Image (spheres, rainbow, N blue to C red):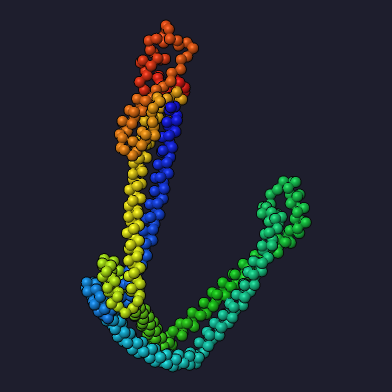
Amino acid sequence: MRGAHVHLKIEQRVRSLEDQYGELGRGTTESEARLRSLGSELDDQYEKLSRMYLPRLDPQAAALTQLRYPKMYERLKDLLADKAAERTRLEQDSEEISQDRIQLERQFDRVTGDIETKVVERNGLRQAVERELEASTRFVELKDGVAKARKNLEQWHRRLDRARAERETKLPEYDRNELFAYLKGVEYGTERHRAGVVTGWLDSLVAERLDYLNQKNDYDYLLDVASAMEGAFDEASAELAEVEEPLATRVHEVSDRLGLSRVISEGEALYRKRVEIVGRLETGDAELRRLTQRIEELESGRSDYYRQALSDYADFLESQDGQRLISVAEATRAQGDDDYVIRIQRLEAELRDERRKLQLLVEDRVSVGNKLHRLRELESRFRRNDYDASNSDFYDGFDIDRLLIEVLEEGLALEEAAAQMKRHHHFKVKRSSWSSSSGGRSSGGGFSSRSSFSSGGGFSSGGFSTGGGF
């Protein structure tokens, strides 16, 4: 039997084991996914049953739990106590904020009343200040001067706006003209224009075609007008400030003497106090809303206490004997818990079956993996000995199928399997034209004989030195 044929049988068995290993791996993955799905559904059923037995975390629901599952009631008591303690703190904080708000509202009312009083006082003093000022010839002259200066400033402001608008509208048109921009850049028409004869002549042709000098005058006029307007506006602003200063000084003198400045200062302080109280009221309202929301949350299914109670309840129910769940469910009037318990028992049975299935799959995969490892090691030894060479041959009577069964199923050691292959194996020697049976180099061994280097494979004997390959 040729060595290549034996190798083919080994490879076929390797491929078969690899396929089995892969299929078992896929089966393991599917089984694990099935377990996760069943486990998730089981947790969901326990949560629904817990929610049915504990629709809310309060003494009434806890009392029913005490009748059904006394041990679970002990867990609920601590959560109820913590919840009650927090609610008490929240209500105390809310009451403190409410009392503070009452005091702040009273302060707000007092300050608002004081402000109204100051407003009346301010208005009366302002009239007195105006009467005294209006009776002064000097004040009337100053006021008229300020009015004239302000009117003059407004006129220059309008003129400046028009000049700037015209400049911003028209100047870009000049700048977009490349020839105009070139002539302006070389300062054509001024003493600073430097050009040779030809260039100067070309520049003059372009300037004549564009009517550049007139265009440049218009361009400069736009700049000059806007600049002049800005200067005039600055002068008018300075004139207004100059005439306003003595007027303001006179107003301050009379306001201070008659008490208007003092009343205004006191009114501003009261208004700042009013703003501060409003801010404190808004802060208190926001905190009160937060406390109220937390109190409402404690009484709903959103509180962390209730979520913890449901989680503990579900864990407790999961630890109970199935018959205990059935007996409790049968003792209630509602049908819902009976349905949940039936579904829970079915899911637990499916989980047990699936776990057993997964265990068998894992065991089979480990077994197949071990066989695959042994077979690959045997194939590796096969190759290391050059048994897959073209002149490799096994004697008649060598049964590779039986040997593989003994290795994979009956626990035959790899060393013994390798020894059996070696005993049944030989390399067919092909004599070359110069190697004869009589005389010379071939009779005593050497490279062509099997006497000195014929024990294994390798380059000098056996596979690749006598039959083929190297």
Residue drawn where x is 38% and y is 31% of the image = 399
**Farthest front residue in view:** 397
Q: Is residue 17 above or below residue 225?
A: above
Q: Would residue 253 be visible to someone looking at this image?
A: yes
Image coordinates for residue 179, horizontal then vertical, percent: 71, 55
Is 36 or 27 nearer to us in this picture? Answer: 27
Q: Give the x, y percent position of residue 228.
A: 62, 69
Q: Residue at x 58, y 82 (%)?
A: 148
Q: Position of residue 52 (x, y in %)?
A: 33, 75
Which residue occupies 38% across, 82% down? 278
Extreme residue toward the top, this view: 439
Q: Position of residue 372 (x, y in %)?
A: 37, 40
Residue at 70 percent of width and 55 percent of height: 178
The image quarter in which residue 419 lies: top left
Position of 71 compared to 367: left or right?
left
In the displayed structure, 24 sits above or below 111; it is: above
